[in-house]
Image (spheres, helix red, strand yellow):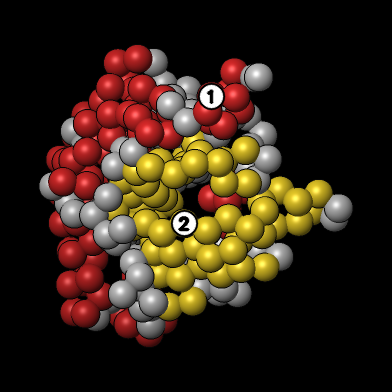
Amino acid sequence: MAFFKVENLTKKFGGLTAVDDISFEVRQGEVYTIIGPNGAGKTTIFNLVSLIYPSTSGRVVFEDRDLTGMPPDKVAAMGIGRTFQNIELFEHATVLQNLLIGCHAHAKSNVFAELLFLPSVKRRELEHRERVEKVIDFLDLQHARDSMVAGLPYGVRKVVELARALCTQPKILLLDEPSSGLNVEETDDMSFWIKDIKNDLGITVLMVEHDMSLVSRVSDRVLAVNYGRKLAEGTPAEVQSHPEVISAYLGE
C-alpha cells in the first residue's frame, strides 16, 4: 500500500509552469524534506499536496485513496495535518482555545446535542481536553496554556501552531518552513520536536525547509527541486553533494 504518493503533479498559472511533472513517495514513519533555492516551487508543491491549490494535472494518493479534487477542508479529517510558513493562529484567543479548535477536525457535530450538552458531547469535550493537555506536555507549552497568542514571542507561536496541527491527530504532518524566523536555539528545539514527533508519536513528516543544518539533522530522505522540476532525491548527504543541486544553489 502506498502511504503518501505524488504522481506527475503539474501546476500552471496562465503560461507559467510552476510545478512540472513532479513525482515522489513518502514512506510511513520517515521525515521526507523538499528543498530548493528561492522560487524553486517548494511552497507551490506543498499547497498542491495539501489541496489548497488544485493541480493542473497529476494526482495525490494517501493510503491508496486518490485525493485529487477533494475540498481542502476535508484534508484534516483524512489524517493530514499542516502548519504554515506564515503562522495561521487565532491571535485573540488563548493557546488552549487554539489547540481545542484543532481537535474539532474529526468532530461530527449535531446541533441539538450541542444545544442540550448531551452526555456524548460532554464525553467528546473531555476527550478533546485530555488530548490537548497531552500535546501541551509533549511540547512544553505549560507556561503559555492560558496566554493570548497575540502576546507570545514568535518562536513560541511557531510551537503553538505545531501543537494545533498535532491536535488534529495526523497520520502525516506537513511542515511548511518550520525554522522560518527562528533563532539558532529555537531551531535546535524544533529539530528535537520533529525527531520526537516521528520517533515517539509515530507520525510521518513531510517538510519544506531552507535551513540545511535542520534538514541534515532530521531528514531520512530529501527531494531537491528547482524551477518546479525534480533535481535529485536521496539521503541528505547524497542530495547536497549532487552536482545539479550545488549548481542550483551556488550557480555554475
Q: Residues within 10 Å of mark 1 (few under 14, many from 20)?
A: few
Asked if residue 60 is positioned above or below residue 234 in the image, the reply reads: below
The amino acid at mark 1 is: Ile
- Circle number at residue 94: none
Question: In front here: 79 or 112?
Answer: 79
Label 1 and label 2: CA atoms lie apart by: 21 Å
Name the residue beneath numbered marker 1: 246
Q: Nearer the viewer, mark 1 or mark 2?
A: 1
Left or right: 143 in relation to 6: left
Q: Is residue 130 visible?
A: yes
Residue closest to the far front: 243
Vertical side of 240 occupied by 122: above or below: below
Q: Residue furthest right?
A: 15
Secondary structure beneath label 2: strand
Using the rendered image of the protein, determine whether residue 98 is visible from the camera's viewpoint.
Answer: no
Q: Are marks 1 and 2 in contact (CB under 8 Å)?
A: no
State the residue position of label 2.
24
